[in-house]
Amino acid sequence: MFDVILYQPEIPPNTGNIIRLCANTGVRLHLVKPLGFSLDDRQMRRAGLDYHEYATVKVYDDWVTCAEHFHDRRVFAVSTKGTQRYDANRYQAGDAFLFGPETRGLPAELLSMYAGERRIRLPMLPDSRSMNLSNAVAVVVYEVLRQVDFGGCI
């Protein structure tokens, strides 16, 4: 129904938590290398518990290959540098949401690929730097699901 793309994720427990979220919501997960960990990392596996087998996860060697997969889809870049609140758009099945690495966010060249309404952000206090990646993904996923009446989730 929807896709989450993690561009060069760095922290294993965050990705494990996101795998668990995706397994429980039917959202597909895409990981863009280089990853800051091995997919067999103990911390990542622990955070994802036994949900790995229930999640759809695809790994790409680079951004170009991943972007080609989504060339005909709406992609929303989620960033503290986003220009529109995450709840201002009307989302639809097939949309994808791109998140950057925990320590540096999405690079400017990736952000510039998306028009203003496709660069979204979560509201925070003015002096805040960023939210935890797995929390940010959960907020966006549940807003998207809410907009489609939770798409089969009970």
Image (cartoon, grey):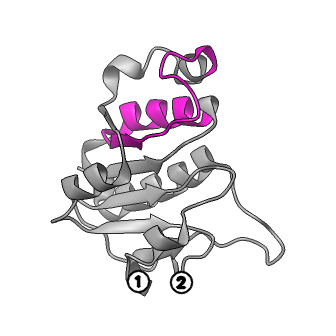
- Please state which of residues 86 and 64 is positioned toward the viewer in this rendering: 64
**What is the number of callouts on the image?**
2
Secondary structure under tag 2 reads: loop
Rendered location of residue 54, percent (x, y): 33, 22
Question: What residue span does the magenta drawing correspond to?
Answer: 14-43
Q: Identify the residue position indicated by label 2 in the image.
A: 83
Can you tell which mark lies on residue 117? 1
The amino acid marked with disc number 1 is Glu
Residue 154 shows up from this direction: no
- Viewed as shown, does residue 92 lie left or right of 141? left
Residue at figure coordinates x 59%, y 16% from the top left: 46
Query: Measured along the vertical axis of the image, is residue 29 above or below residue 120?
Result: above
> Dots 1 and 2: beta carbons under 8 Å?
yes
Instruction: Give the distance between the C-alpha atoms of the residues marked 1 and 2, in whole angstroms.
Output: 7 Å
Q: Name the quadrant containing residue 123.
A: bottom right
Rendered location of residue 62, percent (x, y): 36, 47
The amino acid marked with disc number 2 is Thr
Rendered location of residue 122, percent (x, y): 60, 69
Query: Measured along the vertical axis of the image, is residue 50 above or below residue 127?
Result: above
Q: Is residue 72 magenta?
A: no
Residue 145 shows up from this direction: yes
